[in-house]
Image (tube, rainbow, N blue to C red):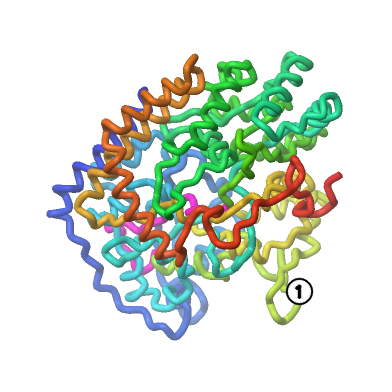
Amino acid sequence: MKKIILSLLTCGLLLTLPSCASQEKEVIYPDFELTPSEKNSWEYLLDENGKPKEEITIEWYVNDSTFSWPGYGNDVVSKVIKEKTGITIKFVTPVTDDGQKLATLISGDALPDVVSVQSWYQQCSQLAMQNYLFAVDELMDRWAPKMEATMEEDLWKYFQLGDGHNYGFPNLCFSNNYLTGEQLYPNGGILVREDWYNEVLLATGNDMTTPQGFIDGCLYIKNKYSDSIPFQLDAFTNEGNKSITWLAQYFATPFETEEGEYQDLRTDDHYIQMLRFLNECNKAGIIRSSNFSDTYSQLKTNISRGKVFVSAGTPQDYQVAFQNCYNSGINYIPLVLRNYDGDAPVLQDISGQGYLFSMISTNCKRPDIVIKLFDYLHSEEGQRLVSFGIEGETWEWTDETKTEIKWTDRYISGALNLNEEDAAWLQGYGLNAMTLMMNMSYIFKYRPNEGRKEEVVYIDNQKRPLTPYSYDFRPSFLKHDTADDNYFSISTKAKKIDIKWAQALIDIIQADDYLSEYQSSIDYANRQGLDEVVEFYKKSYKDTLAVLGLERGYPTHQEGYVEPVTGPNGDFSYWIGATHE
């Protein structure tokens, strides 16, 4: 309840305070000398000797308590960034992810130079519309004139607000620029402990791909191994539960009507089927009561100890735990669970809408230099630095066409711990620490697979067999018209409904009569204005489809959709490296 109150307070601060502040706060672009376009913008920061003309320190707030860059200032990557731009970055993060720190910064008009906020949070657009941010396209025009030409058009259009401006850059996104037509594996998934799954299969012939078969398989393991955790869900928070998001996709819940209009997932029959399934799982005793209050740390420990039979969630959130299992000889593979009607899963791929959206605050005194930092980090040169290192040291081109990268022998030696000195050298390099501008489509295209530890490749492989069921869900990430007079009102109603729904999910799963509990929650949502939210979102959905160049957004409604056919654990031909037996 405390988290829910804090979330409402955060929403309230953003929706009420800036409304009056916007009349007083004016965006003023400093009168620094314009930057020419003859060469890359960051190159103008250096003198004739290749040294920064001036050095500055900026503060960068990252709205994620888990973000850290332990070696910053001492590792190779951070030193090169400073050599290229003259910038030293002081990172600031919240102690907890309750939104209070960000709300305090906003209410005190104390935003630092750069702010990175979850890309789907309302704060991103609200801060822009209330004049707390510089428009990055305006900054580019003045001080990074070649940068806009390098923007991924699909992402650039998607994140453009109703006023025609862009205010930041998403990280961990997949653009069509580098991965045209390629099918990506899903973001979430159901994983089963392989040895126990084989026991169920051999003893009963049950492949666990139906709701009842799933429950029966979990009960078999529960009865055979008293200390096992048959079925584990992600942590329940004031934002909901990721497992329920992924399970709704396994149950083929469409975010679009057959006529091509937006619909709220929670009102669809497939979503109700999914809730029925979870309610039956709870009644069968395969979900521990502690799961409804366990933290992510506790859930990770359960996996790390090999106690979990089925994990439905976001596997990359538990990467270390699954690696510990792998190193102990315990492997997890995916499962293709179907709904009560036998429909194939329709899963969201990892492209999504990114994670953190990085913006330049109007409190920043040197936006002319910071936009050049962004330009460098966003460039292919910058992407190679933060992900691969320095050419000739950690990687090199395979030939003169520069279309393929390979790791150097020293990198491979260090990555595989073949030599202690090389391993220590690589440890202090700082690769993959600066994730805040990371362009995943570029990295995926060029990243070599050799030189990766077995357990790392294994984690990457866990969801790959589910690729045939994985689709681009970007149409579901709505592009709202933030300039609409009703936007803030609708956002407030939607937030209130979502917070209450996150709380109600536990009650629905644990209820004697799940349907009655579900209806009660829907009635509450309707009283709070769900119909108004849906009507507003319908227009947003049409705008989103237009930006993406689509007539239909849900995969099964698109022309050419063919239901995939694979084994109960997917298609292992997508496995990288050694063939899975």
**Position above or below: 195 against 408:** above
Q: Is residue 421 visible?
A: no
Q: Can you say whether 365 is above or below 342 in the image?
A: below
Range of the magenta residues? Answer: 350-370
Please give the residue where the numbered disc 1 appears in the rendered image.
398
Number of labels in the image equals 1
**Is 24 or 367 nearer to us in this picture?**
24
**Would you say 442 lies left or right of 64 here?**
right
Quadrant containing the N terminus in the rendered view: top left
- Nearest the viewer among 343 and 546 is 343
Q: Please tell me which residue lies in front, 347 or 405.
A: 347
Residue 552, position as x, y percentages in the image: 47, 59
Tell me the quadrant of the picture where the C terminus can be found.
top right
Q: Residue 28, located in which quarter of the rendered image? A: bottom left
* Residue sitting nearer the eye, 248 or 489: 248
Find residue 286 and report its horizontal and vertical position in percent.
64, 20
Q: Quadrant of residue 149?
A: bottom left
- Tell me what residue is drawn at x 34 percent, y 75 percent: 141
Q: Is 143 on the left-hand or right-hand side of 74?
A: left
Residue 93 among those drawn in magenta: no
Q: Is residue 270 above or below residue 37?
A: above
Q: Is residue 148 left or right of residue 312?
A: left
Q: Secondary structure at mark 1?
A: loop
Pinpoint residue 570: horizontal percent, then vertical percent: 73, 46
Query: Residue at (49%, 32%) from the top-left corner?
Result: 272
Three-letter code, disc 1: Thr
Does any portion of residue 146 appear in the rendered image? yes
> Is residue 364 inside the magenta stretch?
yes
Q: Residue at x 71, y 63 (%)?
A: 394
Q: Residues within 10 Å of mark 1 (few under 14, many from 20)?
A: few
- In the figure, is residue 201 to the left or right of 266? right
